[in-house]
Amino acid sequence: MAIEELLYKDLTYKLRGIFFKTYKELGRGLNENIYRNALVVELEKNKIAYKKEIEIPVFYENIKVGKQRIDLLVDERIILELKATPKLHHESIKQLLFYLKATDIKLGILVNFGDKLEIKRYIN
């Protein structure tokens, strides 16, 4: 897919810059919440709308059996799922895909502040 065809191209370009800046400033090895808080600072500085820790109910046979939490919802249209592990795991991808399906949001970005910065886009 050419860059011109990317979903929410301008916003995702800004977000990538924020991810790189945050990783460069903080480095690796910190708790996921620290990275999230730093991203919130950058989102506010850049006047990008966001919500954090959005609850997603989980149902079994139409009965609510639990809930999951989205790390950040940016501009009501991009889910950011943050990790701080040495490498991304398949479970993290499945988690983000669940969030996309449950919310009908079109784009999710999985960001791992691990041994190296990993940024993965997923389309619903």
Image (cartoon, rainbow, N blue to C red):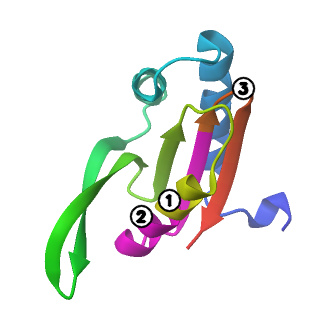
Q: Is residue 99 magenta?
A: yes
Give the alpha-carbon distance from disc 1 to disc 3, as whole Å.
21 Å
Up/down of 8 relative to 89, above or below: below
- SS for dot 1: helix
What residue appears at the point 46 percent right and 21 percent down from the top-left corner? 38
What residue appears at the point 55 percent right and 74 percent down from the top-left corner? 124
What residue appears at the point 53 percent right and 64 percent down from the top-left corner? 94
Label 3: few (<14), some (14–19) or many (≥20) C-alpha neighbours in 10 Å? some
Left or right, 51 with respect to 14, comes to: left
Give the alpha-carbon distance from disc 3 to disc 2, as whole Å.
25 Å
The quarter of the picture where residue 90 lies is bottom right
Q: Is residue 107 magenta?
A: yes
Instruction: Report the mark closest to the observer, 3 or 2.
Output: 3
Q: Which residue of the protein is positioned furthest toward the left in this rendering?
A: 63
Of labels 1 and 3, earlier in sequence is: 1
Residues under numbered marks 1 and 3 in contact, where contact means CB atoms less than 8 Å apart: no
Give the alpha-carbon distance from disc 1 to disc 2, as whole Å.
5 Å
Label 2: few (<14), some (14–19) or many (≥20) C-alpha neighbours in 10 Å? many
**Residue indicated by mark 3:** 115
The quarter of the picture where residue 53 lies is top left
Up/down of 114 relative to 91, above or below: above
Instruction: Report the mark closest to the observer, 1 or 3.
Output: 3
**Residue indicated by mark 2:** 99
The residue lying toward the viewer, choosing from 2 and 121, is 121
Range covered by the magenta-colored residues: 96-111
Of labels 3 and 2, earlier in sequence is: 2
